[in-house]
Image (cartoon, helix red, strand yellow):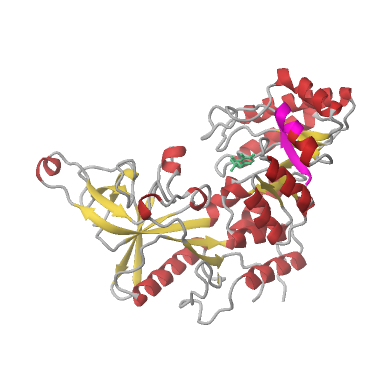
Amino acid sequence: MLFQIQNSPFSPVLVDRLLSTIMALLPAPHETATTTTLKHPHTTHPYRNRTHSPDELVDLAIASHIARILKRSRIGGDESFFIADLGQILRQHRRWTLNMPGIRPYYAVKCNPDPPFLRVLSELGTGFDCASIAELRLVLSLGVDPARILFANPCKAPAAVSFAHEAGVLRTTFDNIDELDTIKTYMPDAQLLLRIYANDESAFICLSEKFGAPLDTTEELLERAWELGLNVIGVSFHVGTGATNPASFCKAIKDARTAFTQATRIGFHPQILDIGGGFQDDCFETMAPVLREAIRSEFPEGVTTIAEPGRFFARSVYTLVCRVISRRRQLGNAAVSGVPDMLYQNDGVYGNFMNVIMEKEVMVPYLVKKEGRNLLVKSKGENPGKDGQAGSHRYSIWGPTCDSTDCVVREVTFNSEVRVGDWLKYKNMGAYTSTTATQFNGFSSTYDTFYVNSESLIDF
Ligand SMILES: Cc1ncc(COP(=O)(O)O)c(C=O)c1O
């Protein structure tokens, strides 16, 4: 039986199809929801529950998987694991549709290429931004129509251009003359987007140092494309990942207008404005109307607008659970001078925490403790530590490698002691985490992911 969904951008039939697909992706349940069987190293059946909040559902899954790990062996596994809430994808997609009506998202696969996650997005009708042969292969293997894929890498290897062409992926970006020559040779019927320079200085990672044609070069590039007989269908930009300044989007949209005018003067018929990625959870609702207004004012005649969000869709879907593998209680002078005790966990900056270095992200751990036989108590670490608080325990948290750069949290205070064997939960770990993990020092870069579905839109 289908539930009617209030204010939903999806029809009940679509939601039904979507959730059926989610279920079809995952192995059939062999046990009840609280004792899920790990059939495949990366998947298990999703929990669905109408009485728990999304956070509670994730915590239940954490408790269940910790119990399972401990049942298998008291020592426990060596690797951290993820809990992914597939229902959160639906909520983010709903937010996108409400705030960016008519702007189709092409999810940036580089952000998190987890296949069940991609499959849900595919069912929701998004497009995909791929940057490499492997990403193209992955998305195509899910049965996605090549017309829904944008090869959004302006500097591609000839082999990659040729692969995309053979696979029927024709939409791609460029920002230099040599790329046009490669495209002419290996994808002469390409549908090209000129990637222009754009920059938000507040972004975590500014992409403008590497990509994007400055406005004083766009005319020359467009003329060269015309000489080569190529087809330019629009303009793209990316203000930088983790952007916060709407003015940077407005400037880029204005510059895109200029490039549109140049392209039209040369003889092209540009129709697509690609506003890239850079959207953040925190400021999405304040950025969106500014952006919409900028598009409306620069393109009063209307324009087909697309985007390449990554972080916005992936970040909040995944929770990471790590285990404390060692602890150093300070002795001697360090103890006297109040240096926090040190916790070593089974995941660090060479694994899922590279954002600590790349984006200067301050991680917030939650302590997951076993109390009695099966009760799990969670308390959030306060950062920075509150020295001298009654009952407070101050720690720094480190990854497992033998490298001192591998520091996950400089200082955090918990209201109870943390011991070897305890678990730490980190929320919002879906963006640029597992996809950037390395095997440095012999530590694994593959992690189990367990799926829950908090979106009770349907009667199961
Ligand atoms: C071309 C391109 N598109 C989209 C994205 C996704 O950006 P974000 O995750 O900030 O939305 C990136 C990220 O680096 C990118 O390089």
- Magenta span of residues: 170-181
User: Does the magenta portion include 172?
Assistant: yes
Residue pictured at 29% horizontal, 69% vertical: 75
Residue 103 in which image quadrant: top right
**Does the magenta portion include 277?**
no
Quadrant where the image shows the C terminus? bottom right
Q: Residue 7: where, in percent of width, then height?
A: 72, 57
Residue 8 can be seen in this image: no
Quadrant in which the N terminus appears = bottom right
Residue at the spot x=40%, y=47% of the render? 350
Instruction: Tell me the quadrant of ligand 1.
Output: top right
Q: Nearer the viewer, residue 421 or 414?
A: 421
Question: For the point 34% across and 64% down, which residue is it?
Answer: 377
Q: Is residue 11 above or below residue 228?
A: below
99 or 369: nearer the viewer: 369
State whether residue 400 is above or below residue 248: below
Q: Classify 41 as above or below 366.
A: below
Residue 212 in the figure: left or right of residue 148 = left
Q: Nearer the viewer, residue 185 or 374?
A: 185
